[in-house]
Amino acid sequence: MKSFLRTRFCSLSVIFFLLCTLSVKAGDDVVRPHQFDLAKLVRASVNFLGGNAGKAEVLLEKLKNRQTDRICVCEIMELQNANAQFSNVAVLAEKTNNGDMGKGYKVAERQITQEKKQMKAQFFDDIKVNARIAVATDCLSLYIKLRQETTGLKLYDILDADTRSEVK
């Protein structure tokens, strides 16, 4: 008797599932990732929860400006030792922008210079810098953009100039 009820329940569940899937239609509208609007989601969430709309605007402003709170310095180089030669190798250093961008760039450049000294002392005989780039963005975004523009670009490291500069 138990197996008969179990079989009936499973068959009814399958039939119900099939009816539900056949009756669901997406319609003419198609959801695309670029249709997602973070600002609308945050505002709707704040309104739904009965929160302060001013705080939502502050949060949205921080999200818009989050790329400019970082400074990234990049050097693209050619590295050579007795066994091999590597071209288009990127070393990046990222620093938090505390308002003094000039100082931030210098700290990040200093970190790359120290890393190049270590690379030369331990791994490579010759290091030749082909390009230097300094921008107000995070290093991952810069690397992705450079990788799209430059074929064969290799990432050596993304240095955190905040923690490395505080150690001394």
Image (cartoon, rainbow, N blue to C red):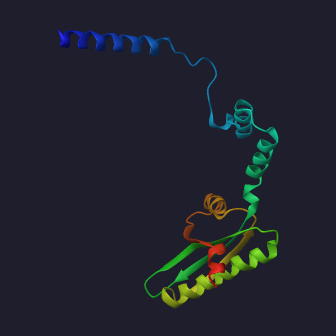
Residue 64 locus on image (x, y percent): 76, 50
Residue 160, image quadrant: bottom right
**Residue 73 or residue 166, whichever sits in front:** 166
Residue 13 locus on image (x, y percent): 35, 14
Residue 20 locus on image (x, y percent): 46, 13
For residue 65, above or below residue 123: above
| Residue at figure coordinates x 50%, y 80% from the top left | 85
In the rendered image, the quadrant that contains the C terminus is bottom right
Residue 25 locus on image (x, y percent): 54, 16
| Residue at figure coordinates x 57%, y 73% from the top left | 89
**Residue 82 or residue 61, whichever sits in front:** 61
* Side of 56 where 86 appears, left or right: left
| Residue at figure coordinates x 75%, y 37% from the top left | 51
Q: Is residue 110 visible?
A: yes
For residue 101, above or below residue 146: below
**Residue 166 or residue 128, whichever sits in front:** 166
For residue 35, above or below residue 152: above
